[in-house]
Image (spheres, rainbow, N blue to C red):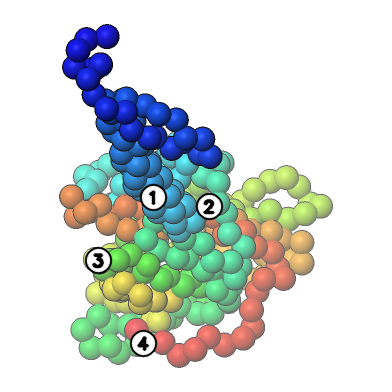
Amino acid sequence: MNNEQSDVKSSEFAFGDVSVDLPGGQRGAAEGAKSSSRGGSRAFSLVAGYALAVTALLVGLVATGRVTLYRNHRLESLPDLRPLDSNEFQKVPDGTSLPAGHVLRMGESRRFGDVVVTPVQLTWEPVEYVNFVSGDTEFSMTTSPLLKLWLKFENVSDSYAFPPMDVHLMSHRSPPEGDDPQTLANSWLHLTTDGESDEVIRFLNLLHSPNSNFLLRNQNSGRVIRPGETVTTFVPCSTNLQQDDFTDSTRGQWRIQIRKGVHVDSGHGVTTLIDVNFSSEDFSTMPLPERSI
């Protein structure tokens, strides 16, 4: 031991219930260790608090559907129709399984991206056409009763507005005027009848051009909804389906392409597919509330 260490005075260092005499230099080291321990505790508390905050945030994002802990299904997010060339159609093969949670029953609500979707009702009603400019009904164009799937959308985003549904998404197909079994489409109705055969019959949605001078009454097509707002719309089946085609054992799967939000950087919409499963028991005879055009 050198002279500097031998000349220093001793001091007391308490450890628990035991008191021992340590040289003054070692006392300083012990106090440094004590200070370091306190600093380490503070650092640990900060890190632990940050970890808890991040965990709570992640749990909230998962619970609200903004984040998934699993690799995204390839059909979870699809491009909107606007960025596609007019002659480009991205077909999802019939029979392709959708991501988990994308199959709904009537009355069931679920969030997809920044929109909550609820299939509300199935009705048989005529489709009425309204002049875009005058608002007058063109009675000569009114159809026979068609099957309508009514859907409610709620915008749950924080800061932007968008239209969750429009006739472009409803009627998009290739070729654009196609209505036969060879027509490519991502939105359709599949019907099966228990006990008769395993055959699945496909019906397309009612064809209505986005460039038409007429709107479908009460459809609210293309209605932009702000955060917190809701809109109710319907998707009608084509005129090829008749009410007599349904029996008590008929089951349906209606695949719909919806807009679930906006890609902020590009400004384009982001779409996805959902399936609405139903049976003959899900049809409603209750009148729907009066809506604007």
Query: How far apart are the two marked residues, 1 and 3, measured between alpha carbons?
Result: 32 Å
Name the residue rendered at 24%, 17% in the picture: 5
At 38% from the left edge and 46% from the top edge, which residue is drawn? 45
Q: Quadrant of the N terminus?
A: top left
Q: Residues within 10 Å of mark 1 (few under 14, many from 20)?
A: few
Residue 107 vertical position relative to residue 85 in the rendered view, above or below: below
Residue 175, given in percent of the width and then of the height, sits at 34, 47
Q: Are marks 2 and 3 in contact (CB under 8 Å)?
A: no
Question: Which element carries disc 4, helix, strand or loop?
Answer: loop
User: Which residue occupies 19% across, 12% down?
Assistant: 3
Q: Read off the residue under disc 3.
A: 160
Q: Which residue is mark 2?
A: 102
From the top left corner, tell me how far across and down residue 169 is, in percent.
36, 58
Q: Are marks 1 and 3 in contact (CB under 8 Å)?
A: no
Residue 179 placement: quadrant: bottom left
Estimate how packed mark 4 is, as few (under 14), some (14 to 19) or many (20 or more) residues with alpha carbons within 10 Å: few
The disc placed on residue 49 is: 1
Crowding at mark 2 (Cα within 10 Å: few <14, some 14-19, many 20+): some
Residues at marks 3 and 4, CA–CA distance in whole angstroms: 23 Å
> In this figure, which residue is indicated by the disc labeled 4?
292
State which mark lies toward you, 4 or 1.
1
- Residue 265 place in picture, x, y as percent: 18, 50
